[in-house]
Amino acid sequence: IMDLQISFVGNTEIDVNIKKYYCTAGIKSIQLHGVLRVVMEPLLGDMPLIGALSVFFLKRPMLDINWTGLTNMLDIPGVNGLCDSLLQDIIYSYLVLPNRLNIPLVAEEQLSKLRFPIPKAVLRIHLIEAQDLLSKDKILGGLIKGKSDPYGVLKLGTELFKSKVIKENVNPKWNEVYESVIYSSTGQNLEVELFDEDTDKDDFLGSLVMNLDELKKEQKVDEWFVLDDVASGKLHLKLEWLSLLSTPEKLNQVLADIKADRGLANDGLSSAVLIIFLDSARSLPSNPLEFNPPGLKKASVRKAIKSGKKVTSEPSPFVQFTVGHKTSMSKTKYKTNEPLWEETFTFLIHNPKIQDLEIEVKDEKHECSLGTITLPLSRLLEAENMTLSQRFPIKNSGPNCTLKMKMALRVLHLGKDTSVPPNSTPSSVQVRKSSSSNAPPQPSVSSESPRPPSTVSEVPRSTPAPAQDKLNRKKEAEEFVKSPGISDQTQRGGGKEGGAAGGMGGQSLAETGRSTSNLNILGSQLYLAGGKESTPSIASDISNPYAAQELQQRLQQLQNGSGPGHLPLGEIQLTLRHSSQRNKLIVVVHSCRNLIAFTDHGSDPYVRLYLLPDKRRSGRRKTSTIKKTLNPVYDTTFEFNVPIMELQRRTLDVAVKNGGSLLSKNKGLLGKVLVNLTHDDITKGWTSWFDLSEDGQPKLLQV
């Protein structure tokens, strides 16, 4: 298997001139971006070593066309999206999984497996509910906040599902189920987007991206996920990875699990999947009226008979498959009674014991039927490996008319039913997204997503003054990385060790409303003594040995010169997590509280971060400055490219500073903390309050 990142940007000039009407049209440039997979199978023992090549896109590629001349009208808003979607649908029907382009390199008989691919699994998606979605509807020009009318869009390969719209509700409950056939889990993602339905343009409410490889390992996931690219919002999904069985032994158990009912033969959850390979037809009738009853005669044929025109001619056949409420049609083969299709179709089956596959061969040219086949699916249950490969006689057609097909039935089975309640163990199926995200997508554009939510209460803190919307964002940011496995540690106070870490002496942290952290706070000498670093940032207090001294002098002035005391500098709340999949350390700066006042008007704090021993300006991360507050709220995410093994020799340097202009005298350090990153729970995520000090080290009260 070879995955190719295709990025085609070409100044393709295609011009069409219609002299009669004095108009020109054409294409000026084409852009195509996507991941193209090349599968080389089967492998052979002699040359050419590979039996065939299968080429397909893993997901829908991005296509952009720049029109010229008369076709410039296709760039009009509303028309351009329709035109591009039509062209993309054509590409999807040929080159997006499960559709593929097969290039044989050896004899035809060795390629049967390639032309009849069996799916890997079926993914069952339960879109249950959402909470705390943004309120996008505005009343009286935004003076009054309304609610939202949310709906969900789920994308997987070529399939797209859209949920119903829940009117005026930021905590909608859908309780809808979707099922999708999976041909390959490697490199495939499930994309979920939420939107607020509006009359003009639907507003973005958040998104998720789920990794199918991780889901395959988990088998079943039932939990809340925090939405990406928005300040608040969580989505409750239940995902089930259903493997395929080639024997009917467990069918009765599956039918009982999905509560199959004879009265709902064509509805409800699926118990099996039917795969059909349509190969060819033989000896189709040339006269569409010869073998059809009068009821099948179409108006066009009657008109031809009345006018005396010749009716007997080569048909243009296509095949229509129907199971329950779903119908699929093959491509049309023009002017032939020996058509060759070589197409594959899949159907999700509710109850194969009582459902039938209905097949009709039709003539597109004469708009009439060329014959039918009705096949009870129970016949497949009795076949070897639940597979049939033969020529099926066509009824209501010629005496020798047959349809060559290969069909297989597979029972859906949940391999590992863990029966885990929501949020009990956060899974790793969610693809994390960079903090430097693009603008929110439109309903037709997919995006990626972040991290699982919390089921624990907030860390208690005093937040006197910020605006209400920042409080809401702060609340969500506190919750979205905590996991239940560490929540009891992050919120409990702890005797002597907890008192030392919190800088509160013998008083426990639980009594002061703070939380302890097992991420140890170290002195700067651990890394500063290790050697020289090149090009430190001039703005960093690491390269400025007087920053801590100035802060100590300011503290003495606040204490009226009463000696080197230990006036608290306040606290900062951080979330730390390492994503091994992306090799990134993710740091969320939530907020600070009880900072010292730098001037009589308060402070203008911002937060600066370094991942020591890297002290270069390119390695610096910085929040925005919030004016005149001692309790700023940031809720800003930063990322550092670092493997998890390298965290053992890294320290996160976090400094809270007072902002100002370039020549301002009011710039300086408000406090800092040095955080060790070697804790085992760094891969799960950790949220805690950290005490600020002059040099980043924890301070103990002297009794």
Image (cartoon, helix red, strand yellow):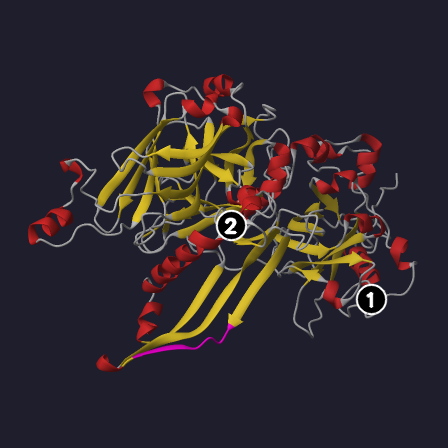
Q: Amino acid at mark 2?
A: Val
Which secondary structure dominates the residues rendered in magenta?
strand
In this rendering, does residue 209 appear at all? no
Q: Position of residue 584 (x, y in %)?
A: 70, 52
Q: Is residue 74 left or right of residue 448?
A: left
Query: Which residue occupies 21% across, 47% down?
Result: 367
Q: Which residues are magenta?
A: 10-17
Label 2 sits on residue? 230
* Residue furthest out toward the left: 306
Residue 177: percent from left, percent from top: 43, 33
Quarter holding residue 701: top right
Q: Position of residue 185 (x, y in %)?
A: 58, 42
- In this orientation, which residue lies closer to the viewer: 512 or 450? 450
Packing grade of label 1 (10 A; few <14, some 14-19, many >=20) is: few
For the view shown, which residue lies furthest in the front direction?
A: 400
The amino acid type, in three-letter code, at marker 1 is: Asn
- In the picture, measured across the screen, residue 701 lies left or right of residue 690, that is right
Looking at the image, which residue is at 34% across and 23% down? 264
At a point 46% along the width and 75% down the height, the residue shown is 12
- Whether residue 657 is visible to the viewer of this picture, yes or no, is yes
Q: Give residue 544's mark.
A: 1
Under circle 2, the secondary element is loop
